[in-house]
Amino acid sequence: MNNIRNFCIIAHIDHGKSTLADRLLEVTRTVIGKEMQEQVLDNMDLERERGITIKSHAIQMNYRLGGQDYILNLIDTPGHVDFSYEVSRAIAACEGALLVVDATQGIQAQTISNLYQAMDHDLIIIPILNKMDLPAAMPDEVTEQIIDLVGCKKEDIIEASGKVGTGIELILERIIEKVPPPKGDPKAPLQALIFDSLYNPYRGVLAYFKIVNGEIRKGDHVKFFNTGREYEADEVGVLRLGLYPRDVLSTGDVGYIISGIKTSTEVKVGDTITHVDRPCDAAISGFEIVKPMVFAGLYPIDTDDYEDFRDALEKLVLNDASLTYEPESSAALGFGFRCGFLGLLHMEIVQERLDREFDMNVISTIPNVFYHVFDRKGEQIDVYNPSGLPDPTEIDRIEEPYIHAQIISMPEYIGAIMKLCLEKRGELKSQVYLTTDRVELSFEMPLAEIVFDFYDKLKSISRGYASFDYHQTGFKAAKLVRLDILLNGDVVDALSTLIHHENAYRFGRRMCEKLRELIPRQQFDIAIQASIGAKIIARETIKAFRKDVTAKCYGGDITRKRKLLEKQKKGKKKMKQIGNVEVPQTAFLAVLKLD
């Protein structure tokens, strides 16, 4: 046990975590020859295409130092704010963390956020200055930033380059020296924390765990503490680039268990594995339940695929514990699920994974956050969907979630960032200069305002330099109205949204204009209206295709032409009564990207 080290890598997005992990695997000869490729731990096509880490990946390495063999368990984590839950789970399974900072960009918002999480769990922090081979590197300035943040000495910071491979041996030595071995009693009853899981169509559910106390052997009779279900441990082993079976795993080991579990709902991330005949007294605590920030309805394009869609979501939740879902139905889209996400990128990734991994083509409704609605009797109702809003006459007040936003940028972009945040109903709380060319702005703002396009706009006005992080602070009363979109007088419930009354007219106007471009023309006029209650605030009309019925009249009395036009008018009127308007999927997606 004294020769085991469990550590994770934390950093802001695009600071070189995955490249550094590649070099660590190369130096320890965990991955050799043809297996070696860039981003070796990012095994999802999506991760490679976008160059981001979506899932945290666990892998075991062996390293020899001073005549001793050491086992190093590495968990590579994502850097984007939408996948912070993956980071929190990795931190719960480790004793140390490599804090990677890009020498060309310096400390960024997500770096600070992840660092505080690691410090709360009393992890040993090893600061690393990455990308030192680049001409744009600013080692002196960034070293000062790290010293201010972590409170370490200058000689504690390792200068490295994941691309070239400098400093990798020193990092491995520092991990063995500084990171303590896992604490625990190998003789105590088994306690193992499940920190991730995966569905395999041939072998059922694979649960990844870290043993806190005791040991587990192949063939043991085990149970999951919170669900109370009992299983045989058909196979236990360690995670290298593949699955490597072992006969026994002891305290401090990170590994996997296969026990023939076929239903995905039986495995919960954060659950504890113990023995049936000698159970532990309590489950491992300190594993927080994730709170989704953004909600949207997901519906299969073909309503016959509903059951397959449910199975796909169940299997996806195993591998992405931050996704929540519950059934709902819509008049426009049929049966589907109301899903909770951590952010818009998370929502986009989930849709993409459903399409690639499960061949599920889905439509999403407008994303929104959840609100507390208080009626005249003082009772609170949680509203996750605009269609669930009570009658306006019964509502006393609506409270919306607020966040504390932290933006780190260069001083020359302060004006544009402040303008953007104030437009989004933000309130400036503090402005602190971290160094002469880095400033931290803190805002309090409604979560609903950052759901749409805030992150994209922030990146474009700061030319990609601003970094952004946020956490929820509570709820505040706001004057919100429900905006409905009507097509020929019928409400399209999938396009309804709750919005601040000051923005309602502008948003309704833009929605109508956008839909006019996207909905195909019919044989009859289509009226697109935006309404608040019974009041219409915007309207656009898609003109009908018109057949020239008077073409065969050449000369003669005007009444002949009029007769033909009247006949056509009656036909159009009849068609309007029986014709219905289909909203294409492109329209739903385009509404999300209103600029």
Image: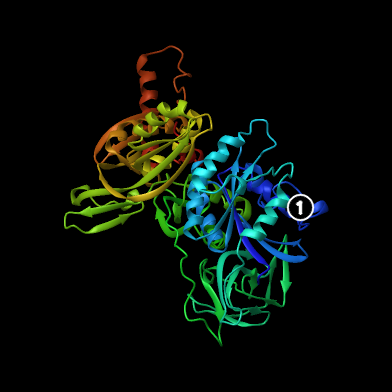
Determine the residue positioned at 23% across, 54% down: 374
Q: Using the image as rendered, state which of residue 566 and residue 476 is in the foreground.
A: 476
- In the picture, measured across the screen, residue 504 lies left or right of residue 34, that is left
Instruction: Reply above or below: 209 against 217.
Output: above
Please name the amino acid that badge 1 sits on: Glu
Q: Residue furthest right?
A: 33
In terms of depth relative to the viewer, which is nearer, 45 or 504?
A: 45
Residue 42 is situated, as x and y percent measured from the top left of the image, at 66, 51
Q: Residue at x 21, y 50 (%)?
A: 395
Q: Is residue 58 visible?
A: no
User: Of all residues shown, which one is farthest toward the bottom?
Assistant: 277
Specify whether 519 is left or right of 476: right
Q: Quadrant of residue 161?
A: top right
Residue ID for mark 1: 26
Count of picture labels? 1
536 relative position to 459: left or right: left
Instruction: Establish if 287 lies above or below 133.
Output: below
Toward the viewer: 303 or 425? 425
Quarter of the image with the C terminus is top left
Give how far across and how far down residue 306 sits, in percent: 51, 58
Residue 357 place in picture, x, y as percent: 63, 54
Secondary element under disc 1, as helix, strand or loop, is helix
Indicate how the structure is coloured in the image.
rainbow
Looking at the image, residue 402 lies above or below residue 574: below
Residue 109 in view of the camera: yes
**Which quarter of the rendered picture does the N terminus lie within?**
bottom right
For disc 1, the neighbor class at 10 Å (few under 14, some 14 to 19, many from 20) is some
- Relative image position of residue 31 (x, y in whole percent): 77, 56
Q: Residue furthest top?
A: 555
Residue at the extreme left of the image, as rendered:
377
Find residue 75 and report its image quarter. Answer: bottom right
Residue at the location (60% across, 40% down)? 102
